Image (cartoon, helix red, strand yellow):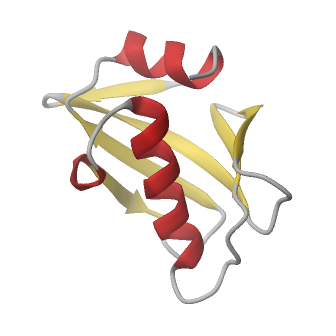
Amino acid sequence: MKIERIGDGVRFTVRVQPRASRSEVAGSYGDGVKIRLTAPPVEGAANAALIEFLSRALGVSKSDIRIARGERSRSKVVEVAGIASDDLRQKLTHGF
C-alpha cells in the first residue's frame, strides 16, 4: 500500500465495495486498500460509512478524515490527519 505523507497526516488510495455483507478491510487493491462497506452507493451513504469505518479502525475522529478525490467513484483518495504512515499501515493490515 502506497502512503503519502501530508502535513500532520497521510494520504492513501481506497477502493470501496458497497453493499457488502459486512464492513471490513478486504486487502490490498493496486497501490491502495480495498474496503467493503454494508452501505449502498447512493446519496453519499457509502462515503459517510467509509469515514465512520476509518474513524473507528484508525482511532481518529471523523473530522480528521477527508475524501480528497473520488466522492462519486469507487476509487477514492483519502486524507487522514493526526496519524503516522506506520500506524495507518499497521491498523489497516493487522486488524483492529
Residue 61 to residue 38: above or below: above
Residue 74 to residue 79: above or below: below
As drawn, which residue projects farthest toward the right? 21
Q: In which quadrant is the N terminus drawn?
A: top right
Residue at the (23%, 30%) spot, across then down: 9
* Residue 20 image-quadrant placement: bottom right
Q: In the rendering, at what x and y percent does residue 51 appear?
A: 44, 56
As drawn, which residue projects farthest toward the left? 7
Residue at the (78%, 52%) spot, across then down: 22
Q: In which quadrant is the C terminus drawn?
A: top right
Q: In the rendering, at what x and y percent does residue 19 appear?
A: 79, 69
Viewer-side residue, 1 vs 54: 54
Residue at the (20%, 30%) spot, across then down: 82
- Apparent side of residue 65 relative to residue 96 in the rendered image (left or right): left
Residue at the (49%, 34%) spot, across then down: 57
Residue 74 to residue 5: above or below: below
Q: In the rendering, at what x and y percent does residue 23 appear?
A: 70, 50
* Residue 37 image-quadrant placement: bottom right
Question: How many callouts does the rendering have?
Answer: 0
Residue 37 to residue 95: above or below: below
Q: In the rendering, at what x and y percent does residue 54 appear?
A: 47, 44
